[in-house]
Image (cartoon, rainbow, N blue to C red):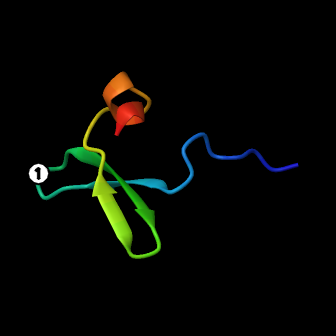
Amino acid sequence: MKNRKQYPGATSYQDHNGKRRWRFRKGAFSAELGAAYGSEEFIRR
């Protein structure tokens, strides 16, 4: 049985300064989460 992702649709990437950022994408909708993974602010967004 596969483990499910805790936050499906959330992916990380490194910006041009090397900082890890998080983004949520579903279909044509995209939103920057921009906080530490799993933090209260991350979950709220």
Q: Quadrant of residue 41?
A: top left
From the viewer's perspective, tell me whether residue 28 is left or right of residue 3. Answer: left
Identified at 30% across, 57% down, the residue is 31
Residue furthest top in the image: 40
Q: Position of residue 23 (x, y in %)?
A: 34, 54
Numbered disc total: 1
Relative depth, front residue between 29 and 24: 29
Relative depth, front residue between 9 and 17: 9
Q: Quadrant of residue 34?
A: top left
Q: Position of residue 18 (x, y in %)?
A: 18, 49
Neighbourhood count class around disc 1 (C-alpha, 10 Å): few under 14, some 14–19, many 20 upward: few
Identified at 37% across, 23% down, the residue is 40
Residue furthest left in the image: 17
**Please, what secondary structure does the residue beneath circle 1 have?**
loop
- Quadrant containing the C terminus is top left
Identified at 19% across, 56% down, the residue is 15
From the viewer's perspective, tell me whether residue 22 is left or right of residue 8. Answer: left
In the depicted structure, whether residue 25 falls above or below residue 44: below
Mark 1, residue position: 17
Residue furthest right in the image: 1
Q: Amino acid at mark 1?
A: Asn
From the viewer's perspective, tell me whether residue 15 is left or right of residue 44. Answer: left
Q: Position of residue 9 (x, y in %)?
A: 51, 57
Residue furthest bottom in the image: 28
Identified at 71% across, 46% down, the residue is 4
